[in-house]
Image (cartoon, rainbow, N blue to C red):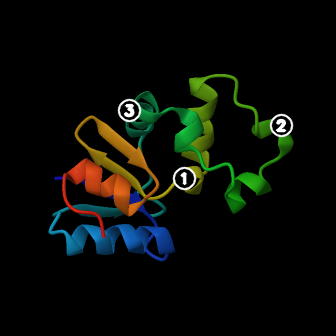
């Protein structure tokens, strides 16, 4: 069963949840502020989609970081940053086995779950 990581009051997360419900896709929702992703989960997501797509550099959290923190040199620094600031993770983050997807568009979810887009 897929797991959707996000924030319950996020508009994009709400759209993703509604899309999944509308298309009968059973899933689990995890509020990653209350239950932050583990280092292993972050590593798995980054391996699948890359740190550049996993970390939302347009977020308020990113903009509030000191300039010195905004240039991670390697995976360890990216991981440490995401562990220290869970809301840097682009949302929603969909995990289904080894498949990870950041963000939401109806077309991408339709393709992922092989159902009609709407």
Circle 1: is it few (<14), some (14-19), or many (20+) Cα within 10 Å?
some
Is 28 or 108 nearer to us in this picture?
108
Image quarter of residue 26:
bottom left
N-term mark: 2 or 3: 3
* Lateral position of residue 48 relative to residue 56, left or right: left
Q: Residues within 10 Å of mark 2 (few under 14, many from 20)?
A: few
Residue 67 in percent (x, y) is at 85, 42
Q: Residue at x 38, y 32 (%)?
A: 44
Q: Is residue 7 visible?
A: yes
- The answer, for residue 31, to whether it is visible in the render is no
Q: Please identify the quarter of the rendering in which residue 80 is found.
A: top right
Q: Helix or strand or loop: what does disc 1 sit on?
A: helix
Helix, strand or loop status at disc 3: helix
Residue at 40% x, 74% y: name it. 14
Decide if residue 90 is on the left or right side of residue 32: right
Q: Is residue 100 above or below residue 108?
A: above
Which of the two discs, 2 and 1, labels the residue nearer the N terminus?
A: 2
Disc 3 target residue: 44
Give the CA distance from mark 2 to mark 3. Answer: 26 Å
Residue depicted at 54% across the width and 41% down the height:
53
Dot 1 or dot 3: first in sequence order is 3
| Disc on res. 68 | 2
Q: Quadrant of the C terminus?
A: bottom left
Disc 2 on helix, strand or loop? helix
- Judged from this view, the residue extending furthest toward the right is 67
Q: Residues within 10 Å of mark 3 (few under 14, many from 20)?
A: some
Residue 87 image position (x, y, % from top left): 57, 57
| The label number, if any, that marks residue 86 in the structure image | 1
């Amino acid at each position: 069963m897929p797991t959707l990581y996000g924030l319950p009051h996020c508009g994009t997360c709400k759209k993703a949840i509604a899309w999944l419900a509308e298309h009968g896709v059973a899933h689990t929702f995890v509020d990653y502020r209350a239950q932050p992703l583990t280092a292993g989960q972050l590593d798995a997501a980054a391996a699948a989609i890359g740190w550049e797509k996993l970390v939302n550099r347009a977020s308020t959290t990113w903009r509030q970081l000191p300039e010195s923190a905004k240039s991670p040199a390697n995976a360890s620094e990216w991981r440490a940053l995401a562990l220290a600031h869970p809301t840097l993770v682009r949302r929603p983050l969909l995990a289904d086995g080894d498949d990870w997807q950041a963000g939401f568009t109806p077309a991408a979810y339709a393709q992922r779950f092989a159902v009609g887009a709407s």
